Image: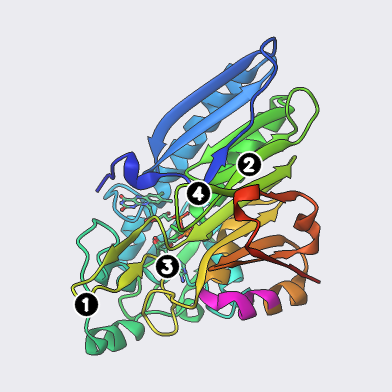
């Protein structure tokens, strides 16, 4: 089911502009259940943006859980199947990230996401008994991928929603770079992929959304990096019990993540990695996220909780807190 524009308000708002004399080409469209805007500068911008958009639409037609013509839909209906190189690549990557995050990211989560009604917006609170039965169908370790063939046991079903937009951003950025574009900003439904820097050579400036309001907490300056945010403030529902339930599920319990984190932003060169990690770290909670960062140190992150922002030292110098939020405690993770 498609959602309204208001419901897909971006977590990262683009603050960048460019000198008027630069050739700019922009394309906005709806794909992967969200609004996307791809903007490139310089010669060849139009052609490369059209190519990037076509690639995103091709990936959506392969990876959607709801499109009856997609490869993932067929795999989910048939308990497996042989898939294209692109689908194989993203499933392989998702399974590797599931292992790295000890199942905080789990691409086999679909039966539980579906039981909560997050696909189709028919929200409900499943009973504890129902969730415990569904948990038996979840488990990335049981999903097999060999020579492009996926095998799913126990009525398992894949959901690549936590990584597909990041992967699509990487593919789109690759197309632009191959066509000689050195300055572009790809906004893939709140996942931002910066190709090079702004046309005047300065960094792109991205606004970090306050999860508790429509305001901006601060500004992140980046070039040639992906910036991806996961949070509980956009896709959620309020149950009859007045509690708020968000779309990011803890695969160990079957319940929406509820650990005090309001949003997690991950910054690294690869969009797919940022997307996988932002979801997984949101599930882990602040302490688990810090532990994960200390173990790998191959990304930067900003963890937002009420009254506090924790950020890794690599991003601290790229982040400016806005004056209105000067009472928020900033903690640098080292
Ligand atoms: P992220 O944090 O990146 O991902 C959260 C999403 O991942 C959840 O919505 C859920 O789908 C899944 N998920 C939740 N918990 C976990 C976990 N622990 N491990 C792994 N995955 C988890 N939405 C619709 O309502 N209808 C559609 O028809 C539809 N089609 C789509 C087609 C494609 C190709 C893609 C990529 C997305 C589509 N979506 C659709 C949206 C999708 O269901 C997710 O809501 C969206 O991708 C969430 O992205 P995010 O950046 O907000 O959050
Ligand atoms: Mg994600």
Give the CA distance from mark 4 to mark 2: 10 Å
Which quarter shows the C terminus?
bottom right
Labelled disc at residue 36: none
Labelled disc at residue 248: 3
* Disc 1: CA contacts within 10 A as few (<14), some (14-19) or many (>=20): few
Q: Position of residue 333 (x, y in %)?
A: 76, 70
Task: Report whether residue 95 is seen.
Answer: no
The residue where tag 4 is placed is 11
Labelled disc at residue 206: 2
**Which of the two residues, 105 or 179, is positioned nearer the viewer here?**
105
Name the N-terminal-most of marks 4 and 1. 4
Name the N-terminal-most of marks 4 and 3. 4
Dot 2 beta carbon under 8 Å from ligand 1? no
Q: Which mark is nearer the camera, 2 or 3?
A: 2
Q: Is residue 145 left or right of residue 204?
A: left
Q: Quadrant of residue 111?
A: bottom left
The residue where tag 1 is placed is 241
Name the N-terminal-most of marks 4 and 2. 4
Give the magenta part as a residue range.
283-290
* Disc 2: CA contacts within 10 A as few (<14), some (14-19) or many (>=20): many
Q: Could you say whether the residue bearing mark 4 is in a helix, strand or loop?
A: loop
Q: Which mark is nearer the camera, 4 or 3?
A: 4
Q: Could you say whether the residue bearing mark 3 is in a helix, strand or loop?
A: loop
Q: Could you say whether the residue bearing mark 1 is in a helix, strand or loop?
A: loop
Q: From the image, give the main secondary structure of the stretch colored magenta.
A: helix
Give the CA distance from mark 1 to mark 3: 19 Å
Q: Which mark is nearer the camera, 4 or 1?
A: 1
Task: Report whether residue 239 is seen.
Answer: yes
Name the N-terminal-most of marks 2 and 1. 2
């Amino acid at each position: 089911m498609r959602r309204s524009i208001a419901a897909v308000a971006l977590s990262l708002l683009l603050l960048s502009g460019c000198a008027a004399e630069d050739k700019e080409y922009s394309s906005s469209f709806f794909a992967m259940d969200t609004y996307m805007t791809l903007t490139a500068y310089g010669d060849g911008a139009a052609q490369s943006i059209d190519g990037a958009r076509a690639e995103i639409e091709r990936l959506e037609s392969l990876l959607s859980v709801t499109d009856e013509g997609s490869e993932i839909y067929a795999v989910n209906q048939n308990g497996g199947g042989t898939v294209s190189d692109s689908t194989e690549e993203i499933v392989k990557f998702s399974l590797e990230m599931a292992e790295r995050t000890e199942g905080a990211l789990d691409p086999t989560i679909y039966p539980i996401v579906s039981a909560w009604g997050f696909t189709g917006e028919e929200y409900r609170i499943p009973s504890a008994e129902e969730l415990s039965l569904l948990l038996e169908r979840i488990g990335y370790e049981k999903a097999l991928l060999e020579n492009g063939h996926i095998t799913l046991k126990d009525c398992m079903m894949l959901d690549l929603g936590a990584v597909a937009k990041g992967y699509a951003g990487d593919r789109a950025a690759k197309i632009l770079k191959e066509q000689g574009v050195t300055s572009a900003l790809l906004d893939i439904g709140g996942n931002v992929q910066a190709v090079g820097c702004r046309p005047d050579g300065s960094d792109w400036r991205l606004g970090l959304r306050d999860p508790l309001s429509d305001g901006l907490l601060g500004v992140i300056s980046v070039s040639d990096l992906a910036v991806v945010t996961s949070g509980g403030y956009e896709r959620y529902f309020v149950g009859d019990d007045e509690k708020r339930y968000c779309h990011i599920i803890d695969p160990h319990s079957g319940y929406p993540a509820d650990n005090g984190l309001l949003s997690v932003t991950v910054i690294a060169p690869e969009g797919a990695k940022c997307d996988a990690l932002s979801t997984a770290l949101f599930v882990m909670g602040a302490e688990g996220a810090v532990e994960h960062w200390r173990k790998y140190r191959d990304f930067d992150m900003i963890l937002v909780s009420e009254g506090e922002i924790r950020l890794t030292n690599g991003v601290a110098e790229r982040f400016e807190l806005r004056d209105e939020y000067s009472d928020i405690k900033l903690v640098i993770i080292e």
